[in-house]
């Protein structure tokens, strides 16, 4: 399809004048184009073809050693007023940011090809879908975007002559860590990313557009763009209810979205709508409806096995790109926690020879698979429904060794917003920096909210008032540990037991105990049938709340809230009420 959109043509021309590529290739999304790009990527050594029998259509890629995760300290929100970026974001004035980035982009594509990738976030033809165009000098990015979004002519058709598209510019430049910047200009719907070739830094439709830019649009337009999975649960009578979950990066969204219910739960089925991002609007019926704006999964590889997440593993058996996992000598992939014996010899994620005797990990802890959602065995029949699915419940959760119990329910929407706004989690390998440090990560959006987080809390409160029958809000924690530092709750598929209590609460089928932090299940109301090696006493342990730990927790929340000069009064009132309930 030849582009006739004048705004697009002019913008591509301007960006090419800046970056000076040898040639420009317009991406149409066809199979022939994919084949061509794969041949080129393989012949240049950028990617490796995996064994055609074991992993048909699959490719392997290693990033630079210094480029294996998102870089939150180098990610900026560039609004005219600093206050609009708020206390949780890095900020730079737009003029300064553009000038600096122009310097870094100037001539950066000399000797390279610039690919023009039109893409859709959201199902084709859906009124909630949005168009982005990413310019990049990376074939790896093109091939990933092909899986993660609806890419090519389908997006150009939806755009038509409109000037409304998110302008993304990505350049690998020299993959220089010191000059790596991920810059967002929400006032221009523009994203400029330079000196990285990894995941969320460069697949601009994902965190940059579908969360940081989209959260801005959502704030202005009255909807929600969230770091949430969406799953459907079908009960034996055929009724399907949908639940979202916001957990920070590498805290279990993909796993929960694809879980297989335990044997005791006969007749229940879980379907995946999305595993990372939800765009939610108020429907004509006054309920909250969510769509998954993505078309694929960019999932954490380590720990993914036929035991922990068979649906994810099966999704990656063809047409998948593996990044920073280990490569075996027979063209297969391997990672820690894959549930199969380690290969006798392999190439590790750094490109070095590896054997099971090696002291280093074979796969990077943040190694990933990029797999088409359509290949997921439990993909929901509604995953591409233009109107999305109606949401009954929302879960917030993180990695908390002690404070948070297995599950509790908020008293109401506003208290639920407080629970989300104060959630904390231990950091993971998904972002560069220390791992295992507890930090407040409101709604799992700390790295992704593209505007002032005080305003974001206010937006959540306002949304609750507009939704006729708002989803019930819960907090979950799969990660309580014992004295030995081991996880107590078995997690993964067993998390269904908690989901069942959540749905029973939504349906008014089960009572709860009112505690200072919210409604909690009675131990007998979490079904433990068939769960070996886990007793009712263990359950009582992880349902307990320790007043001393919560006294610290309240201090932590006070410090957290003190950072906000736009904290809604409702949040301060919720904190006061929590203190009172503990007193
Ligand atoms: P992002 O893609 O970074 O947003 O991560 P995510 O939230 O989708 O996390 P994911 O499901 O990929 O899980 C991350 C890690 O947590 C993996 O190593 C999983 O094995 C582990 N994990 C997921 N669910 C559970 C659980 O219920 N219990 C325990 N103990 N670990 C879990
Ligand atoms: C996350 O870190 O939350 C991810 C991976 O989902 S990335 O695309 O790198 O953001
Ligand atoms: Mn994520």
Image: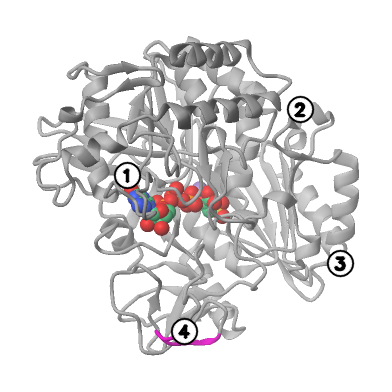
Marks 2/4: CA–CA distance:
49 Å
Point out residue 414 in the picture as x, y percentages from the top left corner.
48, 15
Q: Residue at x 35, y 75 (%)?
A: 56
Q: Residue at x 53, y 52 (%)?
A: 436
Q: Nearer the viewer, residue 446 or 542?
A: 542
Q: Quadrant of the N terminus?
A: bottom right
Asked whether residue 60 is drawn in magenta, I would say no
Q: Nearer the viewer, residue 189 or 256?
A: 256
Badge 2 or badge 3: first in the primary sequence: 2
Badge 1 or badge 4: first in the primary sequence: 1
- Packing grade of label 2 (10 A; few <14, some 14-19, many >=20) is some
The CB of the residue at mark 4 lies under 8 Å from ligand 1: no
Q: Secondary structure at mark 3?
A: loop
Residue bearing the label numbered 3: 107
Please tell me whether mark 2 or mark 1 is closer to you in this view.
2
Residue bearing the label numbered 2: 84
Residue bearing the label numbered 4: 358
Residue bearing the label numbered 1: 272
* Relative to 548, residue 94 above or below: below
Badge 4 or badge 3: first in the primary sequence: 3
Q: Residue at x 22, y 49 (%)?
A: 260
Badge 3 or badge 1: first in the primary sequence: 3
Q: Quadrant of residue 43?
A: bottom right
Marks 4/3: CA–CA distance:
42 Å
Magenta range = 352-358
Q: Is residue 290 left or right of residue 444?
A: left
Marks 2/1: CA–CA distance:
35 Å
Residue 160 visible at all: no
Residue 194 visible at all: yes
């Amino acid at each position: 399809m030849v582009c006739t959109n004048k705004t697009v043509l002019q913008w591509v021309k301007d960006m090419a004048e800046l970056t000076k590529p040898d040639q420009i290739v317009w991406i149409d999304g066809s199979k022939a184009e994919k084949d061509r790009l794969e041949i080129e990527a393989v012949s240049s050594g950028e990617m490796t073809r995996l064994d055609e029998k074991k992993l048909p259509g699959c490719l392997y890629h290693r990033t630079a050693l210094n480029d294996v995760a998102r870089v939150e300290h180098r990610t900026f929100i560039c609004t005219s007023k600093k206050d609009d970026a708020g206390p949780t974001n890095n900020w730079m004035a737009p003029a300064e940011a553009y000038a600096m980035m122009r310097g870094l982009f100037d001539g950066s594509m000399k000797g390279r090809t610039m690919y023009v990738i039109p893409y859709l976030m959201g199902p084709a033809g859906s009124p909630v879908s949005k168009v982005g165009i990413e310019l990049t000098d990376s074939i790896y990015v093109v091939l990933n975007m092909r899986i993660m979004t609806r890419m090519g002519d389908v997006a150009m058709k939806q755009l038509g002559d409109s000037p409304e598209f998110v302008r993304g510019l990505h350049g690998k430049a020299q993959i220089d860590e010191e000059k790596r910047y991920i810059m967002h200009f929400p006032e221009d719907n523009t994203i400029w990313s330079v000196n990285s070739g990894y995941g969320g830094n460069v697949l601009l439709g994902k965190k940059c557009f579908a969360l940081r830019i989209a959260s801005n649009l959502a704030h202005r337009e009255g909807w929600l763009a969230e770091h949430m999975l969406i799953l459907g649960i079908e009960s034996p009578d055929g009724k399907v209810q949908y639940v979202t979950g916001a957990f920070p990066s590498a805290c279990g969204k993909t796993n929960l979205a694809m879980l297989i219910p335990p044997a005791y739960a006969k007749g229940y089925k879980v379907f995946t709508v999305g595993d990372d991002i939800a765009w939610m609007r108020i429907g004509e019926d006054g309920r909250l409806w969510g769509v998954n704006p993505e078309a694929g999964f960019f999932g954490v590889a380590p720990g993914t096995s036929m035991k922990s997440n068979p649906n994810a593993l099966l999704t990656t058996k063809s047409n998948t790109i593996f990044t920073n996992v280990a490569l075996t000598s027979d063209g297969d992939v391997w990672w820690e926690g894959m549930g199969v014996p380690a290969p006798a010899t392999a190439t590790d994620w750094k490109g070095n020879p590896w054997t099971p005797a090696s002291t280093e990990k074979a796969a990077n802890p943040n190694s990933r698979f990029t797999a088409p959602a359509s290949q997921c065995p439990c993909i929901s029949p509604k995953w591409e429904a233009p109107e999305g699915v109606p949401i009954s419940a929302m879960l917030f959760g993180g990695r908390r060794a002690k404070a948070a119990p297995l599950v509790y329910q908020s008293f109401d929407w506003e208290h639920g917003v407080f629970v989300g706004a104060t959630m904390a989690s231990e950091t993971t390998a998904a972002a560069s920096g220390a791992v295992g440090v507890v930090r407040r990560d409101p709604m799992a959006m700390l790295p992704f909210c593209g505007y002032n987080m005080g305003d974001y809390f206010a937006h959540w409160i306002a949304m609750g008032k507009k939704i006729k029958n708002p989803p019930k809000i819960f907090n979950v924690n799969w990660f309580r540990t014992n004295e030995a530092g081991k996880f107590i709750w078995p997690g993964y598929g067993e998390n269904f037991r908690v989901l069942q209590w959540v749905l029973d609460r939504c349906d008014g089928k089960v009572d709860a105990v009112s505690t200072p932090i919210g409604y909690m299940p009675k131990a007998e109301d979490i079904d433990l049938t068939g769960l070996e090696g886990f007793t009712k006493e263990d359950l009582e342990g992880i349902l307990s709340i320790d007043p001393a730990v919560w006294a610290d927790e309240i201090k932590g929340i006070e410090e957290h809230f003190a950072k906000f000069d736009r904290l809604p009064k409702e949040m301060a009132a919720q904190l006061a009420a929590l203190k009172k309930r503990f007193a």
